[in-house]
Image (cartoon, rainbow, N blue to C red):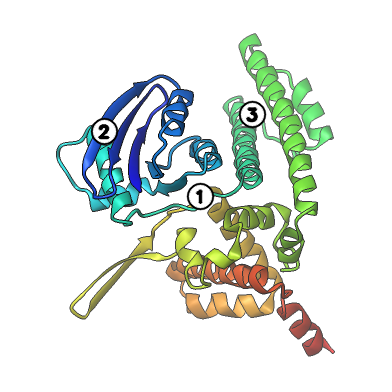
Amino acid sequence: MWSIGLDVHWRTTSVCILNEYGKKIKEKTIRGSWEKVLTYVGGIRQPCQVCFEASCGYGVLYDRLRAMGRRVVVAHPGHVRMIFRAKRKNDRIDAHKLAQLLFLDAVPPVYVPGVNTRQWRRMVELRRTLVDKRVRAKNGLRSLLRSQGIRAPRGLWTRKGLRWLGQVAFAGEMTAIERDMLLDELAQYDRQVDRVTRALDRIGRSHPGVALLQDIPGVGPRTAEAIVAYIDDPTRFRTKQVGAYFGLVPCQDASAGTNRLGHITREGPATARKLLVEAAWQVIRRCEHVRRYFERIGAGKKERRKIALVATAHSLLRCMHAMLLTGECWRHNADAAVAAA
């Protein structure tokens, strides 16, 4: 079977083909869109396998190549760079490296979810982006009021508060124009967030895992859908591995009996990690079992609160993975009911 390495870009793609003995037999640069790449690979009659690095839109290319009946492996870009540390680097060399790794069956692969899951993840990320933009508009309005020495009332973002904000008389016309533009942005982002939220709610209602995770006190639909979308297939992780995927495990430097642990790796989906940490605060307030865990890690020291929070989020994530894997509900609700009785 031939091994094909592709260094894919939007306008040019470098191709390297190795035969069944690992010898380079073809090297080519295709100038044009991905359609030309697909046509070229589809025209190869010899049985072959294809490898390329994950980048923007890699799922579409993966699906199209799989539809041709090819074996496709998508490589993790960061891990490939760790394997090949070379000072000489260009597209043809990268394509040859990928072909060699594929021939040796040593490609560090990434998981490629289905089309629906990829779209679901994009909607989760889109909502997070829109919420951040809305927060930026709100901060701009608060800054504007403060610059004019005006104290904002409580409930500024309610209908009554926004009506008051639209009627505030400023000293200059330019300030009023800035206020009006920020209010327009805020209204636009509100509409967009509501539209995306309704779409996410429709997806969440059709997935039993989202409802299952909301059984945890303090976990809402946004956190549940993000965790379910990024885990996708819970059987692809062991429970102890899921924290590493979400970047909640510490960096480690261990050698000869010395073990140094640093900050968390922050790898994986940042949006899901942020939502998980926010949910951890709510679970700590609502669940006695989780609160005891948080207090034990924190040891009553103020400087350990952040460490305890991350550890609690990691423990909560492992519980969520176990729930998705087994279908079991959050058991501490029942424990609390028995204790109260």
The residue carrying pointer 2 sits among few (fewer than 14), some (14 to 19) or many (20 or more) residues within 10 Å by Cα, namely few
Camera sees residue 188: yes
Residue 54, position as x, y percentages in the image: 42, 42
* Res. 18 image quadrant: top left
Query: What's the amino acid at mark 2?
Result: Lys
Residue 325, position as x, y percentages in the image: 64, 70
Taking the spot 28% from the left edge, 55% from the top edge, the residue there is 104
Earlier sequence position, callout 3 versus callout 1:
3
Residue indicated by mark 2: 26
Q: Secondary structure at mark 1?
A: helix
Q: Secondary structure at mark 3?
A: helix
C-alpha gap between disc 2 and disc 3: 60 Å
Query: What's the amino acid at mark 1?
Result: Ala
Residue 40 placement, left or right of 192 = left
Residue lying furthest left: 87
C-alpha gap between disc 3 and disc 1: 27 Å
Residue indicated by mark 3: 141
Query: What's the amino acid at mark 3?
Result: Leu
> Mark on residue 270?
1
Residue 21 placement, left or right of 102 = left
The residue carrying pointer 3 sits among few (fewer than 14), some (14 to 19) or many (20 or more) residues within 10 Å by Cα, namely many
The residue carrying pointer 1 sits among few (fewer than 14), some (14 to 19) or many (20 or more) residues within 10 Å by Cα, namely few
